[in-house]
Image: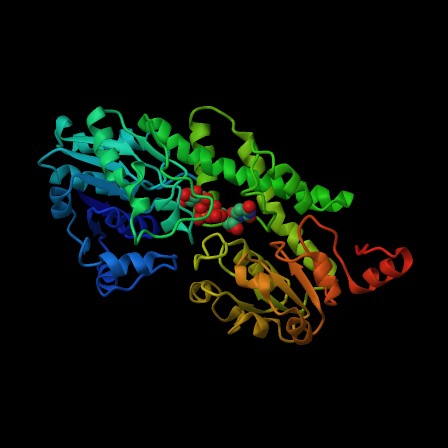
């Protein structure tokens, strides 16, 4: 099938490459000519696993880049809108890019097309797209508007696309549903998974994925409600972490116990310095705004957002309790991206924490495997950028772990110990076992677990013959 994807951001680029992988001819359209030229040259602007492989396979064969939306629309049966939907100051979503794309599509249509929302948008956006297209002269029987939300996580977006838990097709006519099913046919009938060169899926992938056909409104709600629920799960576990600290429990054990109830599930139960990124913070605000418009006071979402903000404050308090005063302290920071596996720093709790520490008068040397360039744009020369994790730790009063990069979980502890001025680690992602840290001579603070220190460990072992370690 010929498909156009409008918008070459993170969703558009991944969707375009994956549609090509499923055998379709794809035109990725963008109005930013600099970006288009870079893509044409084969440059990939985002750090996303398997995207370089897919581009190497399909660029100039099944994936083309273009600035001409009219031509792309005329050549395609389905047009996926994946343009930016930034937040407004009121916490709503700015849909002006979606609207202008809908207007342009309307004036280009000469035969039946399916126009699909792929960007995360509030409920009723599909109605508005339909209205705008009709107002701009598109004939009612020449198009359908559908909602096909994406559930891609940055860093694993390609495998999330090709091995999804479900494919949601929100469409209001049988013709539209059957065209969308054709787009995903190779996934729905499982042929993709038998291909020799298929991108490998995660261990827990269950294939083929179910296809859930809904109304457009339901599909739009599924996306917002899913993100809000996942953010709620994180805030819930972060609240449980605070209680665990207070009562002397270990939140990791609590999560293991909770997560093995299949109704709860163990994923998205990792305590942290809070969720960030371009999706959860924005989508929660937008969902709250949608609720407000429907006269529903969704206070649960207020609380999810509040707990998330508190989590960063609690972390700062932890750093204070490790170091007493902060002014003039030198801190090593591991991680600037909003999560591991990406170079994205939008709404990154790591960057927000760094900024708060700078305000307190700390000096910071930070390292991130992928997000340094982007962080430099925001933090400039206010911090030092270290070439690796060990250099970031060198002569620091304490080391802070702010992003859950896998490589931060496997550091050479003796080397780290010898580099730090004081062997203090404040871990905002629970990457280490407190016992192992204390056995390596670290004073170690984490989330939802007791802080441990070598002195109290030695005293505990001597007094009780046990491995009691809390301070
Ligand atoms: C999220 C959703 O997971 C995707 O399903 C959705 O498609 C996407 O938003 C979107 O709307 O486009 P993403 O923002 O890439 O994906 O990142 P997540 O993996 O969900 O992580 C979000 C934040 O929560 C990160 O800051 C991460 O560190 C944090 N997190 C995640 C935790 O603190 N604990 C966890 O257990 C999981």
Q: In front here: 162 or 29? A: 162
Does residue 327 appear left or right of residue 278 in this picture?
Answer: right
Q: Quadrant of the N terminus?
A: top left
Q: Position of residue 211 (x, y in %)?
A: 34, 32
Counting labels gives 0
Q: Relative to residue 366, is residue 158 depicted above or below? A: above
Q: Residue 113 falls in which quadrant of the image? A: top left
Does residue 161 appear left or right of residue 75 in this picture?
Answer: right
Q: Position of residue 413 (x, y in %)?
A: 65, 69
Which residue is pictured at 61% across the width and 38% down the height?
A: 260
Residue sitting farthest toward the right = 463
Q: Position of residue 50 (x, y in %)?
A: 36, 57
Which residue is pictured at 50% across the width and 54% down the height?
A: 339
Q: Quadrant of the C terminus?
A: bottom right
Q: Residue 409 falls in which quadrant of the image? A: bottom right
Q: Is residue 88 visible?
A: no
Q: Residue 116 falls in which quadrant of the image? A: top left
Which residue is pictured at 56% across the width and 37% down the height?
A: 265
Q: Position of residue 86 (x, y in %)?
A: 37, 46
Q: Is residue 102 visible?
A: yes
Does residue 273 appear left or right of residue 152 in this picture?
Answer: right
Q: In front here: 60 or 69? A: 60
Q: Relative to residue 64, is residue 423 depicted above or below? A: below
């Amino acid at each position: 099938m010929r498909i156009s994807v409008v918008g070459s951001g993170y969703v558009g680029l991944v969707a375009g490459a994956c549609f090509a992988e499923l055998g379709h001819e794809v035109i990725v359209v963008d109005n930013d000519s600099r970006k288009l030229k870079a893509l044409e040259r084969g440059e990939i602007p985002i750090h996303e696993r398997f995207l370089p492989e897919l581009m190497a396979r399909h660029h100039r064969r099944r994936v083309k880049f273009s600035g001409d939306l009219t031509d792309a629309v005329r050549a395609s049966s389905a047009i996926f809108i994946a343009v930016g939907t930034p937040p407004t100051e009121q916490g709503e979503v700015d849909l002006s890019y979606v609207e202008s794309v809908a207007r342009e599509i309307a004036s280009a249509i000469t035969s039946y097309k399916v126009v699909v929302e792929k960007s995360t948008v509030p409920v009723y956006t599909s109605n508005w797209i339909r209205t705008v297209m009709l107002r701009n002269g598109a004939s009612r029987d020449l198009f359908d508007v559908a909602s096909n939300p994406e559930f891609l996580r940055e860093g694993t977006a390609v495998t999330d696309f090709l091995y999804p838990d479900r494919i949601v097709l929100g469409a209001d006519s049988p013709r539209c549903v059957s065209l969308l099913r054709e787009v995903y046919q190779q996934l729905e009938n499982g042929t993709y998974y038998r291909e020799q060169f298929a991108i490998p899926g995660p261990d827990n992938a269950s294939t083929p994925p179910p296809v859930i056909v809904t109304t457009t409104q339901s599909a739009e709600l599924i996306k917002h409600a899913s993100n809000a629920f996942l953010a709620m799960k994180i805030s819930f576990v972060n609240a449980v972490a605070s209680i665990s600290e207070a009562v002397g429990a270990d939140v990791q054990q609590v999560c293991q116990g909770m997560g093995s109830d299949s109704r709860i599930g163990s994923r998205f139960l990792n305590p942290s310095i809070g969720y960030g990124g371009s999706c959860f913070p924005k989508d929660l605000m937008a969902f709250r705004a949608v609720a407000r418009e429907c006269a529903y006071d969704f206070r649960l979402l207020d609380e999810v957002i509040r707990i998330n903000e508190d989590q960063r404050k609690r972390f700062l308090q932890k750093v204070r309790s490790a170091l007493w005063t902060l002014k003039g302290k030198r801190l090593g920071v591991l991680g600037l991206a909003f999560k591991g596996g990406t170079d994205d720093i939008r709404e990154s709790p790591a960057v927000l924490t760094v900024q708060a520490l700078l305000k307190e008068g700390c000096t910071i040397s930070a390292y991130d495997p992928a997000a340094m360039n982007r962080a430099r744009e925001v933090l400039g020369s206010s911090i030092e950028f270290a070439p690796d994790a060990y250099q970031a730790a060198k002569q620091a009063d304490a080391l802070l772990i702010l992003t859950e990069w896998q490589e931060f979980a496997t550091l050479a502890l003796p080397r780290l110990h010898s580099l730090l001025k004081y062997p203090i680690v404040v871990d905002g992602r629970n990457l280490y076992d407190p016992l192992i840290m204390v056995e390596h001579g670290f004073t170690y603070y984490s989330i939802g677990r007791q802080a441990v220190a070598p002195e109290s460990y030695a005293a505990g072992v001597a007094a009780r013959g046990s491995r009691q370690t809390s301070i």
